Amino acid sequence: QVQLVESGGGLVRPGGSLRLSCAASGSIFRANVMGWYRQAPGKERELVARISSAGATNYADSLEDRFTISRDSAKSTVALQMNSLKPEDTAVYYCYGDITTFRRRDDYWGQGTQVTVAS
């Protein structure tokens, strides 16, 4: 069994910064792609950023280079540094992991952490 646990969400003013962290635990053989998705009220879940085991990254076009994803593959952790936050960044942010256990390869999700950008 694999668990992804996020931390770091909260309330921040426009222009501020937050750092989200996610740790994967359990019977992990290899964490392949890890990343972050978000879902705003009334909208579908969307990709924010992903990073491969080799460190290759891709981001949503709308982010305008404000966010940076990183990972520590040895610890199966992934982080998202969010700068110059805007009210439209308000959403529940979900950690994602394409993880191979000792039995199979599956997609895993965290429980989500709320990010609210408001003055």
Image: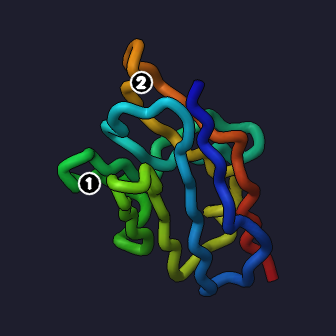
Q: Which residue is label 2 attached to?
A: 101
Residue pictured at 57% horizontal, 62% vertical: 21
Instruction: Give the percent coordinates (x, y) of residue 36.
Output: 50, 49
Asked which secondary structure carries label 2, the reply is strand
Along the line of sight, which residue is nearer the eye, 104 or 86? Answer: 104
Per the rendering, the mark at residue 57 is 1
Q: Disc 1 marks which amino acid?
A: Thr
Colour style of the rendered protein structure: rainbow
Image quarter in which the C terminus is found:
bottom right
Along the line of sight, which residue is nearer the eye, 68 or 72? Answer: 72
Task: Kindly indicate whether the residue at mark 2 contacts the one at mark 1 (C-beta within 8 angstroms).
Answer: no
Callout 2 crowding tier (Cα within 10 Å): few <14, some 14–19, many ≥20: some
Position above or below: 8 against 22: below
Residue pictured at 50% horizontal, 40% vertical: 96
Structural distance between the alpha carbons of marks 1 and 2: 23 Å
Position above or below: 101 against 111: above
Quarter of the image for residue 43 reads: top right
Per the rendering, the mark at residue 35 is none
Number of numbered markers:
2
Q: Nearer the viewer, mark 1 or mark 2?
A: 2
What is the residue that sits farthest to the top in this orientation? Answer: 103
Along the line of sight, which residue is nearer the eye, 107 or 85? Answer: 107
Instruction: Give the percent coordinates (x, y) of residue 38.
Output: 60, 47
The answer to whether residue 64 shows anywhere in this view is: yes
Callout 1 crowding tier (Cα within 10 Å): few <14, some 14–19, many ≥20: some
Would residue 100 be found to the left or right of residue 77 on screen? left
Residue pictured at 49% horizontal, 30% vertical: 27
Instruction: Give the percent coordinates (x, y) of residue 94.
Output: 61, 45
Quarter of the image for residue 69 reads: bottom left
